[in-house]
Image (tube, rainbow, N blue to C red):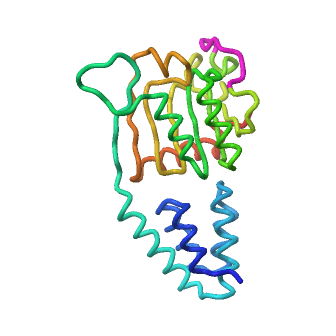
Amino acid sequence: MTDPISTVQALARELPSQDLYALSVAAGGGIAGLRDLRAQASSNIIRRACSQLIACLAHRSADYLAGALASAATADSAHKAQVVDVVWTGPHTRITSSRLTAHSITTLIDEARQEIWLVSYAAHTEPRITTALKSAAGRGVEITLLLERNMDNPSYSFRGIPFPHLDVTRLAWPAVRRSARYTSLHAKILVTDRSTALVGSANITGAAMETNLECGILLRGGPHPRAIRAHLAALHEQGDLIRC
């Protein structure tokens, strides 16, 4: 027997408040509402949640499930205020930061339980990040890499395939979707579980991890990590980003 309370509690541990609210609205529409959300969702996690909640409707009403999910979302929002930190690579001063770029990236990847979006201009098969990504893939984390390619930007000289042996979704920004020649995919972003984002200057290279002067902003909680991830997903859905 599917236990609705246990199902909602498990979803509350796994999903951010925005997804819980979306599930609440869908559950309020009963089986039809959950099926509609499942058909539209790009995330396997949300699709699975919809299926679990449909099974719960055999034991509880739609209003009950919607209320339980809304309550879980409200509680989640209340204790997940955004925490902002600064991440550095480069020389030290007396004004120190507790976080270093390489350590922050590998820690975020190690913490991920659902999905990872990694965006970079230059990306080499950096050993520590390779190990962290391989471990994440092994525990079932969905990994999406959005990286620059020489075929789309002639000024980008690297021609290899970063992390060639990883089973991940690879996206690209094709030249035909760019407004001008030599336009660059220049963003450097790491989003994990829609709840944490690192946005900064560092590429995924050994120099950026160790010797360059790099700075990034680490966001934990709040609306921005999910919004960044949603923007990237929307670019894919509308065809600006393609699978490669």
Task: Indicate the quadrant where residue 158 lies.
Answer: top right
Q: Is residue 69 left or right of residue 224?
A: right
Closer to the camera in the image, 57 or 98:
98
Seen as rendered, the residue at the extreme left is 94
In the image: residue 72, left or right of residue 123? left
- Residue at (69, 50) in percent of width and height: 140
Q: Position of residue 81 (x, y in %)?
A: 34, 56
**Quadrant in the picture for residue 154:** top right
Q: Quadrant of the N terminus?
A: bottom right
Counting the numbered discs, the total is 0
Name the image quarter holding the C terminus. Answer: top right
Magenta stretch encompasses residue 159: yes
Q: What segment is highlighted magenta in the picture? A: 154-162
Residue 79 located within the stretch drawn in magenta: no
Q: Is residue 47 left or right of residue 202?
A: right
- Please tell me whether the stretch drawn in magenta is mainly helix, strand or loop: loop
Query: Where residue 236 sits: x, y (%)?
Result: 63, 42
User: Up-down: is 79 above or below 51?
Assistant: above
Relative to 171, is 175 above or below?
above
Q: Position of residue 58 (x, y in %)?
A: 69, 86
Residue at 65 percent of width and 48 percent of height: 141
Residue 177: x, y in percent?
63, 30
> Is 212 or 103 nearer to us in this picture?
103
